[in-house]
């Protein structure tokens, strides 16, 4: 079985100095780099929130979140210390999500045909929002999914605990 690493929304706006910070979000960078150094993955996916300025999720547009990850801004960039070796270029894919201004999109599984059958390790931000949604959708596609908590951080302890319970109930391994 092929192996895949899915790095969810490790963007600057979700880091401590970003517009929608996840507490201790920067701590995932070292862990992710350790996974990449192991060179055991056949595929590597990076997802990014890639919103237009008028996205429905933004508070000024009636949503619940501060403006974040606007297309082309510094905050929408993947954390620059995540080091993807050059030899991984042919097996690395970027998934842009949340581009429709009128629709929330937490899951990075935007088109089931993009994702090969594989054993997926999932890391990123935030455990209780986009990591959960992505892991659940990968599982619905029939994949084996492991969420590696050392490579994740959540919005709150309570919602992270609830997300973990929901993922485990869906057959996802949380390690």
Image: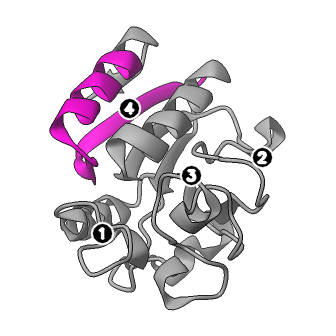
Vertically, is 1 above or below 154? above
Which quadrant, please, contains the C terminus? top left
- Separation of residues labelled 4 and 1 (CA atoms): 17 Å
Q: Tell me which label, 4 or 3, sits earlier in the chain.
A: 3
Image position, residue 172 (x, y; %): 41, 21
According to the image, label 1 marks what residue? Answer: 33
Question: Which residue is disc 4 drawn over?
Answer: 146
Dot 4 and dot 3 residues touching (CB under 8 Å): no
Residue that mark 2 sits on: 114
Distance CA(mark 3)–CA(mark 2): 14 Å
Horizontally, residue 144 falls left or right of residue 89, namely left
Q: Nearer the viewer, mark 4 or mark 3?
A: 4
Left or right: residue 19 versus residue 119 is: left
Q: Secondary structure at mark 4?
A: strand
* Residue 175 in view (yes/no): no
Mark 4 or mark 1: whose residue is earlier in sequence: 1
Residue contact between numbered discs 3 and 2, judged by CB atoms under 8 Å:
no
Return the mark for residue 42: 3
Q: Are marks 4 and 2 in contact (CB under 8 Å)?
A: no
Depth check, front residue: 48 or 80 = 48
Question: For the residue labelled by badge 3, is the local secondary structure a helix, a strand or a loop?
Answer: loop
- Report the span colored magenta: 142-167
Along the polypeptide, which appears first: circle 3 or circle 2?
Answer: 3
* Cα–Cα span, label 4 and label 3: 16 Å
Identify the residue at image location x=50%, y=90%: 74
Q: Is residue 166 magenta?
A: yes
């Amino acid at each position: 079985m092929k192996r895949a690493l899915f790095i969810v929304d490790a963007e600057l706006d979700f880091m401590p100095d970003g517009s929608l910070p996840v507490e201790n979000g920067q701590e995932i960078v070292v862990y992710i780099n350790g996974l990449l150094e192991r060179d055991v993955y056949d595929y590597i996916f990076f997802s990014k929130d890639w919103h237009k300025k008028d996205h429905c999720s933004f508070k000024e547009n009636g949503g619940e979140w501060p403006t974040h990850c606007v297309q082309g801004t510094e905050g929408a960039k993947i954390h620059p210390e995540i080091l993807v070796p050059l030899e991984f270029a042919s097996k690395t894919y970027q998934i842009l999500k949340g581009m429709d201004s009128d629709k929330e999109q937490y899951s990075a599984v935007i088109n089931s045909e993009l994702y090969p059958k594989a054993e997926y390790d999932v890391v990123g931000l935030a455990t209780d929002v986009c990591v959960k949604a992505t892991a659940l959708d990968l599982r619905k596609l029939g994949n084996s999914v492991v969420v590696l908590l050392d490579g994740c951080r959540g919005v709150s302890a309570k919602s992270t605990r609830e997300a973990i319970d929901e993922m485990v109930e869906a057959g996802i391994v949380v390690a």
